[in-house]
Image (cartoon, rainbow, N blue to C red):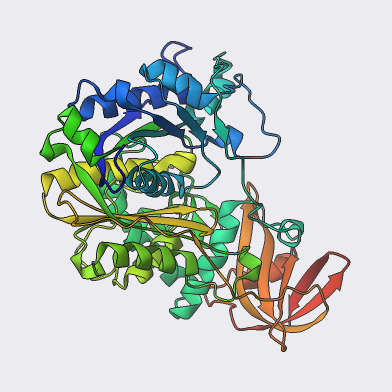
């Protein structure tokens, strides 16, 4: 292990299964089998026969079932995914890691492993992850028994679930699903842009239509079908309302069976293994940043964490956004892409660059915390086809709570500087539970099978404090769903104990 070596990405792999239980148990995938398939593909992709024996660190991106408190394991629990993946891949790493929660994890792990390689701590790392939610849902729906239970004796570092990303006040008011949080951001962006409800739905559809076109041509996409703007922007049985302004196909789809893997080594190890130059991809810059609970953030129409992670990655790479030829921006919801584009200073309406290489989380698929490892795999393939170009991957966790960015190229950098420790937001808004008049700041209306169920708002008091409030009254919900945005309207808030309700003044 040589201190100061350049970190080099030398292998990537992906896996996909359409198994959904309808044809019985044969061929049912598990998170482990999908990881193993992708990891073996990544090992083979290096072109180096000795790579498996060289792996000294193995990191697994946390699966969904281990990312929520008191999660059930309906098909049995794999109690040591890193150890069982090492077994399945024929590797014997000294370090096994089970990463913390968040979609930033794949790029954050690349940034971390690159630093460890540069500092001479490790020589070769395998990063892998997967989700088999499609299999799990299909098995339960069709009454098919599948078994994921497994384990290994090898000790591993379990990084846990990390800090809570939502507050008691947010939960009490009904903010319990990612789409609800992102809808608050989305409607803040729509208000800033002066868009009506229908105009913003069209903007989201125009943003995501090209994503669906990319997914339709991607052999690893779970939902490879192109959709037009009219379909994406119009409520229908196939594209139902979920949380204003979102319809189904504006939302990351988690019913997937997908795995991905990447291998990062030192330049000395790559030379020793005889890895061809054409396989090598270099990390030129990395950036990591985090943000507060959504209710504490002063600005809701832009992401501090995205802005910071992207600017840090570009600065370390010595590049401007104009010098980045290829992009894979996290796309769990349209506002994540709007915010990523804003962080890069590009106009998504006029910039000729594609904003996704995979097809995005609604159409390619949303494999939990691991999506961006697919983005990295696609970036590797793209940059190998375009030697010397630069590409940027932006990975997002929580509700734009944790961000990691990486700038890659087949061209070797003259030197490498590891990513700094994650930046943290410093400004906060005070949240109050009080009665009084306020101005509506942003909102969403949640939906159930029978239609609109609850309106949730953030509003500002005259002294600048923020209140969270909700209302399930049909007349109020109808007003919130009018074409004109209610942002900026006066509301009257009534607080009781830990919650507050509102009416339009």
Residue drawn at 64 percent across, 74 percent down: 428
Q: 352 left or right of 505? A: left
Q: 222 left or right of 169? A: left
**Does 281 appear above or below 323?**
above
Residue 363, x across and y down, in percent: 36, 44
Residue drawn at 55 percent across, 69 percent down: 425
Residue drawn at 39 percent across, 57 percent down: 419
Residue 53, x across and y down, in percent: 31, 21
Residue situated in front as seen by the camera: 9 or 75: 9
Residue situated in front as seen by the camera: 446 or 259: 259
Q: Residue furthest right?
A: 497
Residue 9, x across and y down, in percent: 26, 41
Quadrant in the rendering for residue 51: top left
**Does 249 appear above or below 488?**
above
Can residue 290 be seen here?
yes
Which quarter of the rendered picture does the C terminus lie within? bottom right
Can residue 244 be seen here?
no
């Amino acid at each position: 292990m040589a201190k100061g070596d350049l970190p080099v990405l030398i292998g990537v792999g992906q896996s996909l299964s359409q198994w959904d239980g309808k044809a019985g148990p044969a061929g049912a995938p598990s998170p482990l089998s999908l990881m193993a398939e992708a990891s073996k593909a990544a090992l083979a992709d290096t072109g180096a026969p000795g790579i498996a024996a060289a792996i000294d660190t193995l990191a697994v991106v946390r699966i969904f079932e281990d990312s929520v408190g008191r999660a059930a394991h309906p098909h049995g629990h794999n109690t040591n995914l890193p150890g069982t993946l090492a077994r399945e891949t024929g590797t014997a790493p000294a370090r096994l890691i089970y990463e913390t929660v968040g979609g930033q994890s794949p790029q954050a792990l690349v940034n971390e492993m690159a630093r460890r390689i540069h500092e001479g701590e490790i020589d070769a790392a395998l990063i892998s992850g997967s989700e088999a939610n499609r299999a799990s849902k299909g098995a339960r729906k069709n009454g098919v028994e599948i078994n994921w239970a497994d384990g290994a004796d090898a000790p591993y570092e379990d990084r846990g679930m990390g800090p809570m990303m939502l507050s008691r006040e947010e939960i009490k008011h009904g903010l319990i699903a990612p789409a609800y949080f992102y809808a608050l951001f989305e409607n803040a962006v729509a208000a800033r842009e002066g868009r009506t409800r229908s105009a913003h739905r069209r903007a989201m559809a125009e943003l995501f239509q090209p994503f669906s076109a990319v997914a339709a041509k991607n052999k690893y996409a779970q939902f490879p079908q192109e959709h037009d703007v009219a379909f994406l922007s119009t409520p229908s049985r196939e594209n139902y309302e979920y949380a204003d302004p979102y319809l189904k196909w504006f939302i990351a789809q988690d019913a997937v069976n997908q795995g991905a893997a990447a291998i990062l080594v030192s330049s000395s190890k790559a030379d020793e293994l005889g890895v061809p130059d054409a396989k090598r991809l270099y990390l030129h810059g990395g950036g990591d940043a985090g943000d507060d609970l959504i209710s504490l953030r002063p600005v809701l129409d832009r992401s501090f964490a995205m802005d910071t992670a992207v600017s840090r990655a570009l600065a370390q790479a010595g590049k401007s956004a104009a010098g980045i030829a290829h992009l894979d921006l996290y796309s769990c919801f349209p506002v994540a892409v709007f915010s990523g584009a804003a962080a890069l200073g590009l106009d998504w309406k006029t910039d000729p660059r594609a904003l996704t290489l995979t097809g995005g989380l609604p159409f390619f698929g949303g494999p939990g915390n691991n999506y961006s490892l697919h983005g990295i795999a696609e970036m590797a393939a793209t940059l190998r086809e375009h030697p010397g170009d630069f590409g940027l991957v932006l990975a997002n966790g929580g509700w734009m709570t944790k961000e990691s960015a990486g700038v890659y190229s087949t061209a070797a950098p003259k030197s490498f500087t590891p990513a700094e420790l994650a930046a943290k937001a410093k400004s906060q808004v005070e949240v109050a539970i009080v009665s009084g008049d306020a101005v509506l700041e942003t909102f969403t209306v949640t939906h159930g099978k029978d239609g609109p169920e609850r309106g949730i708002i953030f509003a500002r008091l005259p002294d600048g404090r923020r209140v969270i409030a909700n209302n399930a009254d049909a007349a109020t919900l109808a007003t919130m769903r009018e074409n004109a945005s209610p942002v900026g309207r006066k509301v009257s808030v009534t607080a009781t104990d830990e919650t507050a309700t509102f009416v339009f003044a």
